[in-house]
Image (cartoon, rainbow, N blue to C red):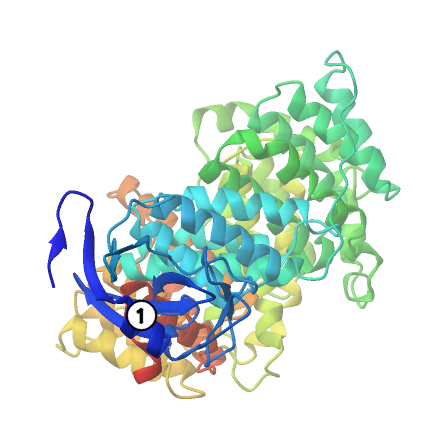
Amino acid sequence: MSSDTDSGFVEAVSLEDLRASGRELLSKNGTAIALFYHEGEVRAVDNRCPHMGFPLSEGTVDDGILTCHWHHARFELSCGDTFDPWADDVRTYPTEVRDGTVYVDPNPPLEVSPAEHWANRLETGLEENLRLVTAKSTIGLLDADVEYTEPMATTLEFATRYRDMGWSSGATILGCMANVMDDLEPEDRKRALYTGVRHVASDCAGEPPKFDQPSFSTSEVSLERLKDWFRECVEVRDADGAERCLRTAVAAGHTEAEVAEIVFAAATDHPYLTTGHVLDFANTAFESLEHVGWDLAGDVLASLVEPLVTASRSDESSAWRQPVDLVSLLEEVYGGDVSETSGLEALAAEGADAREAGEWTPPADLQTTLLGDDPEAIVDALADAVADGATTEDLAAVVTRAATTRVAQFGVANEFNDWNTVHHTFTYANAVQQTTRRTDAVELYRGVFDAAMSVYLDRFLNTPPAPVPEPSDNETGREPDAILETLLETFDREGEVNEAGRLVAEFFDCGGDPADLKETLGRGLLREDAGFHTLQNVEAAFRQFDLLAAEGEADAGADDPVDERMRRMPLLETARYMAAHFPTNREAEQTFRIASRLNRGEAIHEA
């Protein structure tokens, strides 16, 4: 067959033969093109159905519609547009008839770039809650060298606009996946983005959209007054009023730290709101804005209002009142009420000079006290620490270590659902710690005390405590890569909780690189149909490991450095948590693999 080099058209088939057969298959430059003669016109389309790759030359043409025979996706033959959003449009090719011969241009210019195409498809996938479409879109966007922050921003905007109930697990998962992106291998970054996107789409499916409240038409209201108004509105569960106050703070140009103070003051006015989820949601919202930019702050932060005003309050629950009235213990320190801070302010004033000088170090017995069974001693120890100059970040770090230990030593004889109990405390404590690095508001001392009380309440789940391997106990001499391979195999079997923890200890003892361990844990996580809590747990564990590693580098040679056992604890606890929840059906991984193969042009139907 000859080619017309001037126009790009290539000779395809005689018009007489095409008219007789109704369809022909042409292969040019690696592209398979289906030619059709229908209603007196010659049409050419990509032979691969954009849905799952079935050959369209084996489809049916009727009344101007091409129908794929595999999943019955339908396409308008002349332009390739689909009737079915889950299928995508099929690419068409220009044709000409010259002297009884059909010519086709197999390389016409793209109407839109791959990045623009996949961005459009991402929006469709979100709107229709189509897993294969979101998988193909996220893979396609990253393959087109689009930064993950762009589809993340699209998804975050969708999450906050199309869910009247506000911020929820889907948006949190999206933020968690963004936070671990740098710890993953390139292919797993696509899985991570797909995980966040599909959870947001599922969260918003069938939900009514959110209708925004505007900010006040003034920028003259002081930050302190906006903060008071916002807290009062949240206290009486007035969502509309709270949203107007918060949007006004953002519109008036207050800094991230100032707006964070408003949000987290309200989020700690009652202890441990909705088993810690509310503060964790808020922290992840701020972290997400660090990825996508502060321009989205108004809508993103407004989505936190509904979870705040509808939250369950632990001071109203029996567990925090009986048999020991933990709320009363906290009220004495806070200033007479759970929403007060005057008592904390007085303690902080005592330690102002020491805090300014950075002189506070944790007492040697503080971890033992936090993990003990005397809540009054715990509250007293934390109050003493504030008076001695401990910052909110200092104390949050210490309490988070105790919460990490609870998960690492969770006894497998407990009910399975109690994994969530220790997990909630851990992720709440982590969120408080992350927040203290964003704002030094005195209200966050309350978050630290609340986390410590939750650690106390979880004490029976460490009875007896699962043993944590000591450094050097598992120095087997094995190659670290072999240990990681064994760890992944462990996740293939149910109930290998303690073995997963031991393998992490062995990996460290054998000199493994923590970056390789995090990549492997990420791979193990993202190949599963991991639930909300497991995804949260791994992200928080990675954060805690990095913070402890940085602290270890900073205090090398100090009198009270972070010990090696504690430094390993976050990755050990998350490996145990993962092993408790794996394996799963891996349905999402199957969809991801199909999407990857389709984007590479492979024939799925022949597999």
Query: Percent from the top left, x then y, of residue 17?
Result: 28, 74
Residue pointed to by mark 1: 597
Quick check: 120 left or right of 230? left
Query: Percent from the top left, x then y, of residue 23?
Result: 35, 74
Query: Percent from the top left, x then y, of residue 535?
Result: 49, 64
Residue situated in front as seen by the camera: 227 or 545:
227
Residue situated in front as seen by the camera: 514 or 43:
43
Outermost right residue: 236
Residue situated in front as seen by the camera: 213 or 378:
213
Which quadrant of the rendered structure holds the C terminus?
A: bottom left
Query: Percent from the top left, x then y, of residue 476?
Result: 16, 79
- The kind of residue on which mark 1 rests is Arg
Q: Residues within 10 Å of mark 1 (few under 14, many from 20)?
A: some
| Residue 478 figure quarter | bottom left
Q: Secondary structure at mark 1?
A: helix
Residue situated in front as seen by the camera: 420 or 32:
32
Quick check: 449 left or right of 77? right
Q: Is residue 416 above or below residue 235?
A: below
Outermost front residue: 99
Quick check: 144 left or right of 130? left
Is there any visible trace of residue 607 in the rendered image?
no
Is there any visible trace of residue 264 in the rendered image?
yes
Q: Image point 45% across, 47% down: which residue?
A: 119
Q: Is residue 176 above or below residue 149?
A: below
Which quadrant of the rendered structure holds the N terminus?
A: bottom left
